[in-house]
Image: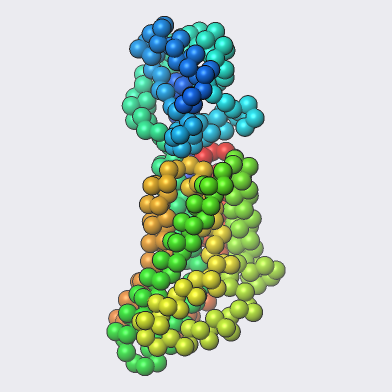
Amino acid sequence: MIKKLIKFSLLFVFIFIATAQVVQAQVDSKIYLFYGQGCPHCSVVDRYFEEQDLYANYPIEKKEIYSNRDNALLFNSLLTKLGVPENERGVPLVIIGDKVIVGDRSIIDDFVVKADEFLLTDTEDQQDESDLNSSDEPASLDITLPAVIGASIVDAVNPCAFAVLIILMSTILVAGDGKKALMSGLAFASSIFISYFLMGLGLYKALELGGFTEVFFKVVGWMAIVLGLLNLKDWLWYGKGVLMEVPMSWRPNLKKLLNSVTNPVGAFGIGFVISLFLLPCTSGPYIVILGMLANTVSQFKAILYLLLYNLIFVLPMVLISVAVYKGFDPAKAEEIRQKRLKTLHLVAGIIMLIMGIVIVGGWI
């Protein structure tokens, strides 16, 4: 199983970098006109384009950014990839391949010349890409999906979550009721799913309402790098310095809480409390993904990604619960967990480090 996890992490790295390179190439494949509703300078450009019949003669995509958040995300994403500072971004603005023209007078004076140069040097393949990327967010889905899957797997194989579930299952099995243990495990996984999803949704909304900036997005990238390095540290020197698991001082109280559970109802209720204990060692990848979602996708897609993330996160809890019901000894599971602790940290470190480098490098 560990070998499979390592192979997956390497595959994830390859997919992530490959999709990022595709996106970078797509920056040069369109002509965009970004404008704001009610902007007088934008109206001047729009009127000029209509009078000169430019909309009919050039492959121009109009994107309104004042009221359309998806278009605003695309606007900032493209300009970030093109290296345009935030203080130089405004509307009206035209992107022609890798060229940016800002302001009504500059657009009117330079658009035709630059657009003709672009179309002369462009290839037929770019026109095919234009059809494939007609949505508001041509690349965010492709890039964000492997990131969500990778980070959720980091959380899913987290030693903290495994340890908590094993203690819970051992406690329930003392009564000798395998079915009750199964229902308790599933109830516990359900409550963890609900609590993590709601916490993630709340933080996402806070980031969205607070005006998520490119600077904070870079902070998220550096956070991922730090988390990756700390996990690699735990692989090389386990237990030294900061440990990417539940703090040792919390563990006695955590075990007492879990030992008090005797039925599925109790397991469901205690899951919400335990989620707070798990936050120090599981929140890192989650925060990185939430920051990515707030910067790259619409609210509807963000909710879908959060659901996917948390389903993957609790999947091992469900599988272990079923395995114990089928006769698998929780003590054996704990023995396997202890033997594989350092390797799990290695897998987490690789994925988080690559995600951080990709974010800081501006590839998404």
Q: Using the image, determine if residue 147 lies above or below residue 193.
A: above
Whole-percent x, y for residue 301 in the image: 39, 47
Q: Residue furthest bottom?
A: 175
Whether residue 337 appears in this view of the structure is no
Position in image of residue 17 (x %, y %): 49, 42
| Quadrant in which residue 352 is drawn | bottom right
Above or below residue 351? Residue 98 is above
Residue 326 appears at what percent x and percent y?
Answer: 30, 81
Query: What's the residue at 32%, 79% (across, down)?
Result: 183
Residue at 38 percent across and 14 percent down: it is 55
User: Along the line of sight, which residue is nearer the eye, 36 or 156?
Assistant: 36
Is 103 left or right of 313, judged from the image as shown? Answer: right
Closer to the camera in the image, 21 or 273: 273
At a point 63% along the width and 48% down the height, the residue shown is: 219
- The image position of residue 298, as x and y in percent, is 43, 43
Position above or below: 97 against 267: above
Residue 153 occupies quadrant:
bottom left
Residue 328 figure quarter: bottom left
Residue 195 higher or lower than 269, as above or below: above
